[in-house]
Amino acid sequence: MPTLTWSDELALAHTQMDATHEEFVALLGAAEAALAQSHLAGLEAFQALVDHTDGHFSQEDRWMAATGFSPENCHTFQHTQVLGLMREVARVAREGADFGPLERLLPELAAWFPIHAQSMDAALAAHLQNVGYDTATGAIARPPVSQGMTGCGGASCSPASAPAPAETATSV
């Protein structure tokens, strides 16, 4: 049984983000199941998760860049750190036949993901809604008025000088 399963508690009411997150959870479960069968099958399934995560994080990073997040925001930084770790773990397994880090990382990703989704991604989803961002066209109905968010986009980690998304939308 996978460590993490998709549930309504992970949903953010953002159709595209939710679909991407549901796929992440499914691929994570598939990697866990495959690793239980064999190291090579686990590595192959994990590489599919890495590939998905690269696209998943790149998509969210593009949305942030398009809607007023500064390049040094903590959400993008976390994406860079997690994806870098995933790539390194895959490399160690592939090149060194050391599957210990992979075996340890999968349950850690299952523990990390709900926290990331319910905090940073929830803030991003709210921000996208507040600015009226259309992910299909890139159009922004209500462009943000701030200089750019340097936190994660949530009120709990944005600096006082950068209004949280809800504050930005109401000040327009």
Image (cartoon, rainbow, N blue to C red):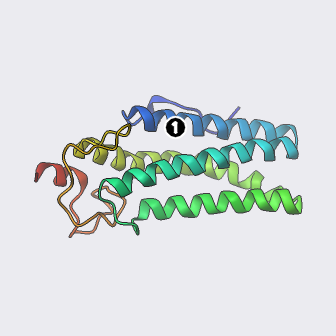
State the image quarter where residue 83 is shown. Answer: bottom right
- Residue at 89%, 58% (x, y): give it: 97
SS of the residue at dot 1?
helix
Percent position of residue 21, x then y: 52, 38
Is residue 115 visible in the rendered image? The answer is no
Q: Is residue 142 visible?
A: yes
User: Which amino acid, by three-letter code, is at mark 1?
Assistant: Thr
Which residue corresponds to mark 1? 20
Q: Position of residue 141 (x, y in %)?
A: 20, 43
Depth check: 56 or 97 in front? 56
Q: Is residue 10 above or below residue 46?
A: above
Query: Measuring 54% from the left and 62% from the top, which residue is drawn there?
Result: 80
Task: Give the number of callouts.
Answer: 1
Q: Is residue 3 left or right of residue 99?
A: left
Q: Residues within 10 Å of mark 1 (few under 14, many from 20)?
A: some
Give the vertical position of 93 relative to 24 (above or below): below
The residue positioned 71% from the left and 35% from the top of the image is: 30
In which quadrant of the rendered image does the N terminus lie? top right
Question: Left or right: 64 with respect to 93?
Answer: left
Residue extending farthest to the left is 171
In the image, taking residue 19 as reference, residue 108 lies left or right, namely: right
Residue at the image point whose x is 59% and y is 48% from the top: 53
